[in-house]
Image (spheres, rainbow, N blue to C red):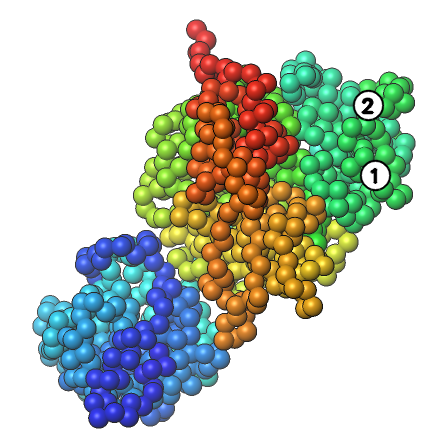
Amino acid sequence: MTAITTEVADGNGGPAHWRRVLAEAPPELALPFDRPRPHTPDPRTARVALDVGAELHARVVELAAAEGVSPMTVLRAALAALLSRLGAGTDIPLGGRTAAGERIVVPADLSGDPSFTESLHRLHDGAATASRYGGAAFERVVAELAPAARPPYQVELVVEEPVTAASALAADAAGPTAAEQPPGGPAFPPCDLSFRLRPRLGPDGGPAGLRGLLTFAAGLFDEATAEALARRLVRVLGQAVARPGLPLSRVEPLDGAELHRLLVDWNDTARDVPAATLPELFEAQAARTPDALAVVDGRVRLSYGELNARANRLARLLSGHGVGPESLVAVSLERSAELVVALLAVVKAGGAYVPVDPAYPAERVAHLLDDAGPACLITTGALRPGTAGAPGTTTVVLDDPLTEAALLGHPGTDLGPAERTAGLRPAHPAYGIYTSGSTGRPKGVLVTHASVDRLVRRTGYLDIGAGDVVGQLASPSFDATTLEIWGALLNGAVLAVAPPGVLSVAELKEFTARHGVTVLWLTAGLFHQVVDTDVTALRGLRHLLAGGDVLSPAMCAAVVGALPGVRLSNGYGPTENTTFTTTHDVRGADLTASGTVPIGRPVADTRVYVLDAALRPTAPGVAGELYVAGAGLARGYLRRPGTTAERFVANPFGEPGERMYRTGDVVRWTAGGVLEFLGREDGQVKLRGFRIELGEVEAALAAHPGVGRAAVVVHESDSGDRRLVGYVVPRRGTAAVEAAEVRSFVARRLPEYMVPAAVVPLAELPLTVNGKLDRRALPVPRFAPVTAYRAPGSPREKALCEIFAAVLDVERVGLDDNFFELGGHSLHVTQIVSRVRRELSVELRPRVIYDVPTVAGVAERLGTARPAPPPIVRRRSG
């Protein structure tokens, strides 16, 4: 509101000033709304009582006299301090009244964390400036601009004429209405919050209290929220007048009961379960049900006893290679029963597995192996060339005849303590998984046995049992695998492992039906794809968990409406807190009350805190950064003590020495103690379920010899499709860079999900006046072909070109245009496969598009493809 304090030199100073104020109104204040603002204004209002006792009223008057300001200024300063602590910022316009009852706007400048005394004088000066231009001029401009202009303030404070003791009863009966209809022309719509107070005077004429009402927009706030705001204003006012020299950042709007609810009651998740290691938990399950089916894929079926024996033999082989507690073992295997055996064997030997997705580019695989420095690498002969060159690492090739012979020479019984290099404890790492790194290099997260135990055993949100079949769809390098594998095997369920690669919706439907899957985890992107394509693919499930990104309320509503027997849970959590931190069972009411699907409450042995920049708890409805504590915390980042210390910080609300993890996610509590996700505060994004540090993608672009500077953003199309887009500036002395060549360069170094869908060369990156990247000024990418257009010939080619164009949202696609250069990604692959199946009645394997990413290549492969099978109908027994 800097315009308020700017002198206007023309002859019509008052109106000109207020026109500038209305034209330069600041962005909407971040108030603790219970619901988003509707597109159509909602005129409904409601009221709650607002009372200030006689003693506090007297202290307000005393402070005003001591500082040479009015009592109204003290009240304004307290209201501004409250709003600032509730997330409204430090530049807050407050509506008010002149002595004649005319409206004005008073600026509250709270920048620099002033003391309450300093804020009094800033508000006093701002009110004087606003009054000098005259409320009458404001009213004329309001009448001139209304109703087209936006209201110049969302919050107002009005203090009415005082009443004596003799007239107090009549005033109470009438209520504080005198100032509600100010003189002047047409009014703006009602503001969001209107605080109105009437001073009461005692028999001696002294202050005897302030009584009034808080009128609030009923479409935005619940009555309970308004009542809390009224209480908090009185609380802040009491602290301010008692210690006026206190910095506003030290003012606490929450009382003891509210803080206890935020910090203790909503974090009451402790479970009375001693932590255990994964081998002892699995071995106990195998002893109880040795003949029960444990894991199944397209080729292999293993009972708990058979799985245990196979893993024991491999564990002994690994132990012979020196694997034990604190050892890292890289595992480069495709999704299969063989992968499950290997992971179980590593933890049985006492080591921690580091999954390395065979689909990763060779350069990334080399970096992971070099950074982790594993004692051992487990792979197969077919995959070994992609993991070659790891110095000092013993490679165990599972299908090598020498390895197979060695395994047969080991017993299948459980390992005894003497067979490990050291005793295994729950605090030892069970696995290390690499996430995208903000510095441009991926970083490994070490997760303990105790943390995995907390994720899958007696959790409160996961009720997997012996009658369940858990689908295993996640990539080996995605931490959702932790939930799938250990959630099944430590609870006596069957683990059904999907074939390697990306499954189409039809293939997913066939997979879940064939194995009778009852529990399934889907990334948000795949969840949306499945629901949009064929929601009946999820019909046989008992429990569907989705997450990894923001869930669409419309897609959730489709599941809730079409599949009432399926329990749908939104799961949220960073890798650093072992897959899940909070969960929320989605119900119909969640999908109408607000524009987001809540991420819920903390799971067992987990505590969550929503804090501001000074690590103070924020009130319900107020945005803050999410911090996480409890048994799910990872040990830290592998060989990165500095980064670990930066992100895993001391917990001021826990026991001495306890840590909490800074997620970087912005959330808020609802009044009912449920978390809502609002976004990220840094450069990290979630895309198709994967966590991506934009800095790592930018570093890969900048590594190209022709690129001088790079920026990466997430572009969202009109259809809602979100894709990474890279912008590059040529290195000095380089005439130009070829977008396709830069993208190909990056694709050799990063996983597919991190490769920008488009690379846009620019002469310069646009900057703001502060020298920062102006993301809004970046040009919209064009996902256009880079090859000469070659028209389709046959009807099948024409149909494929139309399918590619529709899915990729481009005008046309020629026979030789590259799917990935047009912005295609894995979810587009599943869409194309589904449409080919539906429109051409041919079964197209997703792998084909990766192998031959052109219409011509796909058309040729379709010549040998099998017809699509008829839909699977699930029949109920009995």
Q: 780 or 439, which is in the foreground?
A: 780
Disc 1 marks which residue? 388
Q: Residue at x 48, y 74 (%)?
A: 249
Q: Residue at x 34, y 37 (%)?
A: 588
Q: Is residue 288 above or below residue 197?
A: above
Q: Position of residue 148 (x, y in %)?
A: 20, 67
Quadrant housing residue 379: top right
Q: Is residue 420 above or below residue 647?
A: above
Looking at the rendering, in which quadrant would you find the N terminus?
bottom left
Q: Please, what secondary structure does the residue beneath circle 2 have? A: loop
Amino acid type assigned to the residue bearing label 1 in the image: Ala
Quadrant housing residue 845: top right
Please report whichever mark, 2 or 1, sits nearer to the chain's N-terminal start.
1
* Res 131 seen here: yes
Q: Residue at x 55, y 26 (%)?
A: 859
Disc 2 marks which residue? 399
Q: Residue at x 56, y 16 (%)?
A: 866
Q: Position of residue 469 (x, y in %)?
A: 56, 22
Which class describes the residues within 10 Å of circle 2: few (<14), some (14-19), or many (20+)?
few
Which label was assigned to residue 586?
none
**731 left or right, relative to 771:** right
Q: Position of residue 305 (x, y in %)?
A: 72, 17
Amino acid type assigned to the residue bearing label 2 in the image: Asp
